[in-house]
Amino acid sequence: MFGPQVPSVTPNEVAPGAYVLDVREPDEWEAGHAPGAHHLPMMEVPARMAEIPTDQEVVVVCRSGGRSGQVVSYLMGNGWDNVRNLDGGMQVWAAAGREVVSENGKPAQVL
């Protein structure tokens, strides 16, 4: 979808403790996200790029992989060479049986 210039990983390729950057909207994040993930909504990325590590692999995730692919492309265009798109996003993460946690006290779900 984004061409070969955007590297991606599958949920099973994401190592425990990896830096997972969730670029979804606050309501999506609160409903369910990967444990230990870092939340930075897509529209805030340009203003908050200094928060994104350059010294370790960063896996960027959204609901289905579209927004996160755009963020990976944007970051690569700004000098990041350590970013990967989570292929299929949180939908595929959850379908692969990876843990999902919520911030709102309700059972975790992917919106």
Image (cartoon, rainbow, N blue to C red):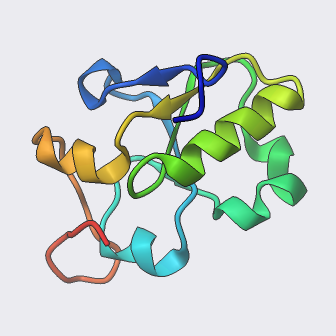
Give left or right: position of 57 versus 109: right
Q: Residue at x 43, y 69 (%)?
A: 29
Answer with the quarter of the image where residue 88 lies.
Answer: top left
Q: Residue 67: x percent and y percent? A: 58, 53
Q: Is residue 62 above or below residue 96?
A: below
Q: Is residue 82 above or below residue 31?
A: above
Question: Which residue occupies the foreground of this view, 54 or 27?
Answer: 27
- At 68% from the left edge and 44% from the top edge, which residue is drawn? 71
Numbered circles on residues, count: 0
Front residue of 64/52: it is 64
Residue 65 is left or right of residue 80, and the answer is: left
Residue at figure coordinates x 58%, y 40% from the top left:
69
Q: Is residue 71 left or right of residue 66?
A: right
Residue 34: in sight, yes or no?
A: no
Residue 19 visible at all? yes
Residue ID at (45%, 48%): 37
Q: Can you give x and y, in whole percent of width and height, for residue 100 in the image?
A: 23, 55
